[in-house]
Image (cartoon, rainbow, N blue to C red):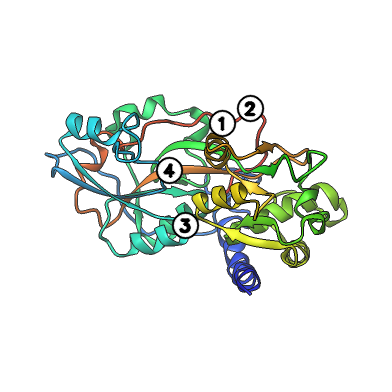
Amino acid sequence: MRATRTLMAATALGGLLLATACGSSDDGGGGKSAPGGQGFTPPKMSAPKSLGKTEGKVNLIAWAGYAEDGSNDPEVDWVHPFEKQTGCQVSTKVAGTSDEMVNLMKTGQYDAVSASGDASLRLIASGDAAPVNTELVPNYRDVFPGLKMQPWNSVKKVAYGIPHGRGANLLMYRTDKVKPAPDSWKAVFDDAGQHKGRVTAYDSPIYIADAALYLMKTRPDLGIKDPYALDQKQFDAAVALLKKQNANIGEYWSDYLKEVSAFKSGDSVVGTSWQVILNTAQGEKAPVKAVLPKEGSTGWSDTWMVSAKVEHPNAVPAGGAPHGRAQQPLKGAWTEIKG
């Protein structure tokens, strides 16, 4: 029952997301073919031209693991060095989904958020995220050029955050349950019935793009060129594929730790995953591997964004944000970035 309800909600909301975030020919500075081309004009706001004295505190919304303070692992502590360097005491609210991040940002209680591409444009369009002056962030020059000024973190050549990572959505499987080793997304779509009840998928409307990517490679008659910019026929085909898949889904996941547990227990044996999930599961001795399917992959890109209602405007840019690793892209590991 949960799987069916989630899919229905994803279908309804996904139409809105794909139409507003990715379906416009207005490139917003990103190019007509770029995933995430915008079809909106953000509220008028100006980036700060200078910084004053820091307020001594910064309130963040972040994905798990993005603002580690040593409490989970004494060897992994990025927050305390940041606090010592900047004088800003960090308070972090860990969010589990992009929707949760968007809703939390609307409260005005947080200064910054580590938004993924399926949240960043919503925050810009709603006026909840403010433009940033990258010249005020000393480490901006060290960010990978391929992450900067992209259609999901800028509009009309105006930056709306400091990007810090990207990665592929991978196909993960239990090596003792899924044989031969899969090399295609067919394992979770057309062949999902082979593992009925133990297939898992990402619990978000953006997952519609994963179905569209598979169809782009396997149904050339649909004419899909961009899995994030679909006409009605293409969208309907992607939804139909997800409905077919739904009969074989055991669980839709958003909390990466729950997916780790599901693969460890064997409740899930094949499905879409992230590199951090693979690393964690393997670290906990789960018999899992992950591959980049032959059709390619969607991916994610995260950006630290500043609230338009920021209470501590000078503390936020003092060091960018307290995260430790800017993640290198997996070579050849993704063909589209979630926008």
Mark 1 crowdedness (10 Å alpha carbons): few <14, some 14-19, many ≥20:
some
Q: CA distance from mark 2 to mark 4?
A: 20 Å
Give amino acid for label 3.
Answer: Thr
Q: Which mark is residue 97?
A: 3
Mark 2 crowdedness (10 Å alpha carbons): few <14, some 14-19, many ≥20:
few
Give amino acid for label 1.
Answer: Pro
Q: Which residue is mark 1?
A: 329
Of tags 2 and 3, the one toward the viewer is 3
Q: Which residue is mark 4?
A: 303
Q: CA distance from mark 2 to mark 3?
A: 26 Å
Q: CA distance from mark 3 to mark 4?
A: 15 Å
**Secondary structure of residue under mark 1:** loop
For the N terminus, the image quarter is bottom right
Give amino acid for label 2.
Answer: Lys
**Secondary structure of residue under mark 3:** loop
First along the sequence among labels 2 and 4:
4
Residue 339 visible, this orientation: no
**Secondary structure of residue under mark 2:** loop
Give amino acid for label 4.
Answer: Thr
- The residue positioned farthest toward the top in the image shown: 142
Q: Which residue is mark 2?
A: 331
Residue 201 visible, this orientation: yes
Q: Position of residue 325 (x, y in %)?
A: 42, 30
Front one among 221 and 174: 174
